[in-house]
Amino acid sequence: MVRMEYKDYYKTLGVERKASVDEIKKSYRKLALKYHPDRNPGNAQAEEKFKDINEAYQVLSDPEKRARYDQLGESYTRWQQGGQPTGGFNWEDWFTQSPGGGGVRVDVGNLDDMFGGGFSEFFRRIFGGAADMGPMPGGRGFPQRRQTRVQKPAYQQETVISLLEAFQGTTRRLEIDGRRLEVKIPPGARTGTKVRVANAIPSDASGAGADLYLVIQVADDRRFERKGNDLHTEHTIDLYTAVLGGEITVPTLSGNVVLTIPPGTQPGQSMRLSGRGMPNINAANNFGDLFVHIKVKIPRDLTPRQRELFQELSQGK
């Protein structure tokens, strides 16, 4: 009887079992950015957490693997509720099987594998049998991909960057088969951008190497919303500035900017800061715009004199 620890992927990503695909992706991006090895150099605990996060996302982001995992979870829960009979849970019933004799194929390597890790025994047993999950020739922990085409094989892996990194451009350090690679992610990258690393995967016995594509995911930013190359943000001003006009300081990804507020500015009014958005990935000197959406704060605690003045203004309408 095989003994193995059950992994709660929903708990790992901090989502409910009924979470939507978008909720799963949002949580993954947030956690992957927080525990990424580049942000936690030398932190073994963060590195292990990063492995778990990526493994959980590999399963829960794929409808086929998620359905299989949910079925396993229901069976495991029934076993627990039944008093956990002697002999332990029968894992063999859940070891990878499919009509073709193979498992649920994992097409994408885990970015953390490139730092020397790999998928857990739980993942390999349930989702990737030996036929599908052997290590890549010369690689460390990379799942192999069955090739159905003659052309040069390629592998892809998602990596998360912040909006500021997408604005400035950034790098990711990889280690494959003892080789250290530094991948440059250009300014203007957006979710779905693919960065090609030619011949990143070592050649196999036939001499055929493989390219690696980093698929970019840009994490949500609490200050800015991105739409194409334009950015949108909200800024609250007081009533007096809205009525009389004035100047406010607006943060942008390239530094603070002074914005002039004209007299009579209305709540919800938008103002454009030209060239303060995201760079065009194909033309680094071409930037989108930043749209500032104005919110007006209405005063609550008025002095008697202020109330009197407002009453005078209302009578003069």
Image (cartoon, rainbow, N blue to C red):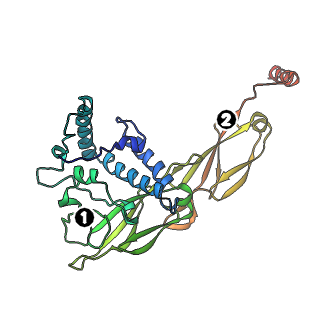
The type of residue carrying mark 2 is Pro
**Residue 23 percent across, percent down from the top left:** 41, 41
Which residue is depicted at the point 35% across and 34% down?
A: 18
Residue at numbered disc 1: 144
Query: Which is more foreground, mark 1 or mark 2?
Result: 1
Q: Is residue 291 in view from this perspective?
A: yes
Query: For the image shown, how many numbered marks are present on the structure?
Result: 2
Q: Please say if 8 is above or below 139.
A: above
Q: Secondary structure at mark 2?
A: loop
Disc ID at residue 267: 2
Where does the image place residue 223, in percent across and percent down from the top left?
60, 47
Dividing the picture into quadrants, the one containing residue 78 is top left
- In terms of depth relative to the viewer, which is nearer, 179 or 280? 179
Label ID, residue 225: none
Report whether residue 22 is seen: no
Screen quadrant of the C terminus: top right
Position of 296 relative to 152 (above/below): above
When asked about the image quadrant of residue 265, the answer is: top right
**Left or right relative to 144: residue 214:** right
User: In the rendered image of this protein, does residue 35 appear above or below residue 243?
Assistant: below
Taking the spot 28% from the left edge, 75% from the top edge, the residue there is: 209
Picture coordinates of residue 95, whole percent (x, y):
18, 49
Closer to the camera, 226 or 11? Answer: 11
